Amino acid sequence: MSAPEAPPAQTVSRRRYDRLLRAREEAEALLEAKSRELWEANQRLKAQAEALEKTVESRTAELETAMHAAEASNRAKSVFLANMSHEIRTPLNGVLGMAKAIGDTDLSPDQQEMTDTILDSGQILLGVLNDILDISKIEAGQMDIENIPFDIAELAQSAKRHHGFKAREKGLGFEVTVREAARKWVTGDPTRLRQVTGNLIANAIKFTKTGGIQVTFDLDAAPPNATLRIEVRDTGIGISADGIANLFRPFHQLDASVAREYGGTGLGLSISHHICTLMKGDITVQSTPGSGTSFIATAQVATAPAPEAVAAPDIQSLRETLTGKHWRLLVAEDNKTNQMVLSKLLQPYELEITLVDNGEGALQATRKDHFDLILMDINMPVMDGIDATRAIRADEASGKRPATPIIALTANSMTHQIESYLTCGMNGHLAKPLVHDTLLQTIAQAVTKPELLQVPS
Amino acid sequence: MKGVVFVELLSMAETLIGEDAVDDVLDATELASGGAYSAVGNYPCSELMALVGAFSAHTGHSVAFLQTTFGKWIFDKFAESYTVFFEGKTDAFTMLESIEGEVHVEVRKLYPEVELPRFETNRVDANTLEMVYASERPLVDFCQGMIEACLIHFGQEAVIEQTPVNLGEAFGAKFNISLTAKMAA
């Protein structure tokens, strides 16, 4: 394009035109350069974003792998702990049963003391195993919470019975108060609540040298719901703010010196905290180092009507019941040690005990003889306890014979399993390791009033 | 220095002395750019000073007067094009105080390489603002013009006292701006 020779009037001068043109060309060049810079910056950003995305992807994959590995190993740990605890519990059951049996014989005071030490140590070991089993169940999400009616006052009484002696032995005051509002029946899990209360009281006794422990039960009721509040207040060594922060972590004690001086696994509070959480409650703590600690455990319960009073037979009348007649007992149990424990525990009573090794043996025995009671292990070779129970019940139904009470005898004390024992035709349940008094009570009740049997809590 | 300043200077000059006179001055002045300025370009500040000097010689007005006039011109253009900086501001002092902390911050985002003067402000009392200018460029009177235009923009009147100061940069001045009593109320 060529410019006209002479610009007409009213138009810009050549020099002005040239300057404007140069200014425009310069602006365009600048724009071009800027555009290029922008495009390149954009490309760099895109590349960077892609690289970032790839990094994020690979990091996420790495983390997922690591997480799966961690979860798997944690599961393996829980399973291992549960299995080990179970495997240790069975022989421990034998040790405790035999020690108890020895203790019931004529012993010199020295021998009696040694036997008591075996029993005490065994009970402590059993407690540790139960804690480990509990924490494994909690970690596996398999801790079941029962929902049965119970008396709060009775819960308080049992706490007093179990811990009063230990506190007095240490020269500590021990006071259990049930507030007026809490003198009621509610539904909840009394066993787990007893465990939580027991743990808090045992800790209080452990960490208090002078003064005393006050336990208070209170109920904040808004029917049909209610919050049970258990406060355990001590005058012990107290806990620092840092200590409180780590208090509920499993396997955690305030410091190594606590483990040395006071012992314990560091599982109790973690378990108690989990139990309260499962019951839609919590555990809170207030403490001043040097002047004492107050733990408050809460749990959701439901208000329940008090059942008709059934007088619990005392141990003397149980003995009389058991010695009153030659009761015929059939025991199906494959473990020799357990057989022996049971025989020894029942030796003082004139019972006729027939021992068989499996469910098939039990079934055959019932076809030949009449029994007043059958104690049935669950896991047995040839035929397990559940199949045997079904077969016996079928026999009885077709032969029009009255039903013999059958009590499950097992270490599996999980609620839903007990239900399955009851639905297959069993009348009750005894948890191993067998506790002398509970065994007597259950047998006496089964042979006299089987309709009153209930799953022991 | 941003090309927009040159474009505006020529635009103002054209309204004052006409296109032909501006072209004459551009032709007569030694300029590396040849006087072809684009608003988006960058040009040496020395060309601006040469141009102001040339317009001063051409018009007979002092350089100080031309700088002040140009400062006012630029402020009005600024107020027209960048209303966002005026939002929520109802007086000249608030506006002047915001130059360093708001306006220059935004300018640096768009032009990271830009060299900007420093403005420090200090409220002596309700009616007095002290504003200190420090720059590598001799544009004290240009600032004076901008301050004057800013007061006019907000309908305020003030006495402005200019004192040279040395703050390390090549050029510096302190402006003491006292609102006149009748307007201050």
Image (tube, coloured by chain):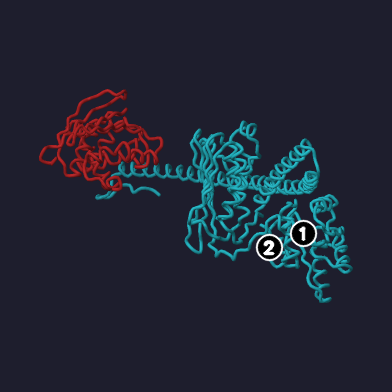
Residue ID for mark 2: A454
Q: Position of residue B132 (x, y in %)?
A: 25, 30
Near-viewer residue (A45 or A104):
A104
Q: Is residue A40 visible?
A: no
Chain identifier for the red-coloured part of the image: B
The residue sitting at the left extreme is B182
Comes first in the chain, label 1 or label 2: 1
Side (left or right) of A415 relative to B84: right
Residue type beneath disc 1? Leu
Side (left or right) of B116 relative to B73: right
For the C terminus of chain A, give its image quadrant.
bottom right
Q: Are marks 1 and 2 on the same chain?
A: yes
Residue type beneath disc 2? Gln
Q: Position of residue A450 (x, y in %)?
A: 72, 66
- A65 to A170, vertically: above or below: below
Please state which of the two labelled residues, at mark 1 or mark 2, is closer to the viewer: 1
Q: Residue A124 shows which numbered tag?
A: none
> In percent of the image, x 71 and y 44: which residue is there?
A123
Badge 2: how crowded within 10 Å, few (<14), some, or many (20+)? some
Chain identifier for the cyan-coloured part of the image: A
> In percent of the image, x 80 and y 58: which residue is there?
A377
Side (left or right) of A69 relative to A302: right
- A420 to A235, vertically: above or below: below
Q: Position of residue A226 (x, y in %)?
A: 50, 59
Residue ID for mark 1: A322
- B40 to A455, vertically: above or below: above
Q: Is residue A211 visible?
A: yes
Q: Secondary structure at mark 2?
A: loop
